[in-house]
Amino acid sequence: AMSARAVLDFPSVWAGSGASMAKNTPNTPHDFWGKVAVLENGCWEWLVGKPDLGYGYIRIFGKGWRMHRLAWFLCEGPIPDGLDVLHNCPSGDNRACCNPDHLWLGTQQDNNRDMKQKWRQVTGATHGASKLTEDEVRLILSITGPSRSIAKQFGVRQNAILQIWRGATWKQIERTGT
């Protein structure tokens, strides 16, 4: 069942904007929450329009909204400057979740800390910019020689080798004997 907090009149939220609603844009709370599925884990998942890394997304009066931010705005009120709406879904963060009970306000620093604590930070070979595999990094850690020639051998910059050796990057790879 939807929370009593979820009953807020859309026209009053957008009153005074002077703009018209886009086609297929929810005009009432019923329209909005009608596009949400209540899952067994308690998440209220936005079902349409998820082009933004899995976050629900919609444009209303020319303003783009991620759905979890809009859900917070509708249920809890304006989002203070400098704060983000963060997820804390019990079964793991669900970017499409709009359940205000699974959302909280925090700074970008809070969001980064939360991401690291939940092991959601992209690291190592799964990072889109990575040129090395974990096995190659282990090999780099086991060999000695000039960093410039090792970098050339692996097709990376010398600084990448130095950062691996210092432990500034690829921190998840266990270092032995150092």
Image: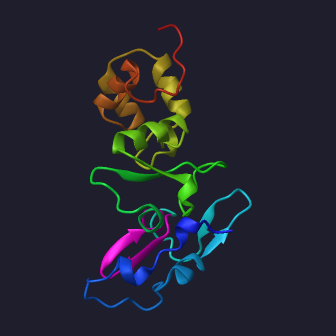
Residue 5 appears in the rendering: yes
The residue shown at (48%, 66%) is 71
Image mark count: 0
Residue 15 screen position, x and y as percent: 31, 82
* The one of 122 and 19 positioned closer to us in this rendering: 19
| Occupied quadrant, residue 34 | bottom right
Residue 59 screen position, x and y as percent: 38, 78
Above or below for 101 versus 22: above
The residue shown at (55%, 39%) is 118
Identify the image quadrant of the N terminus. Answer: bottom right
Residue 51 screen position, x and y as percent: 47, 71
Q: Is 159 positioned to the left or the right of 112 in the image?
A: left
Residue 154 screen position, x and y as percent: 41, 34
Q: Residue furthest front?
A: 4
Q: Residue furthest top?
A: 177
Above or below for 27 versus 50: below
Q: Is 152 positioned to the left or the right of 66 in the image?
A: left
Residue 123 appears in the rendering: no
The residue shown at (50%, 17%) is 142
| Occupied quadrant, residue 159 | top left
Q: Is residue 47 magenta?
A: no
| Occupied quadrant, residue 161 | top left
Q: Is residue 57 magenta?
A: yes
The residue shown at (43%, 36%) is 113
Q: Is 162 positioned to the left or the right of 10 in the image?
A: left
Above or below for 166 versus 62: above
Q: How is the image coloured?
A: rainbow
What range is drawn magenta here?
55-70
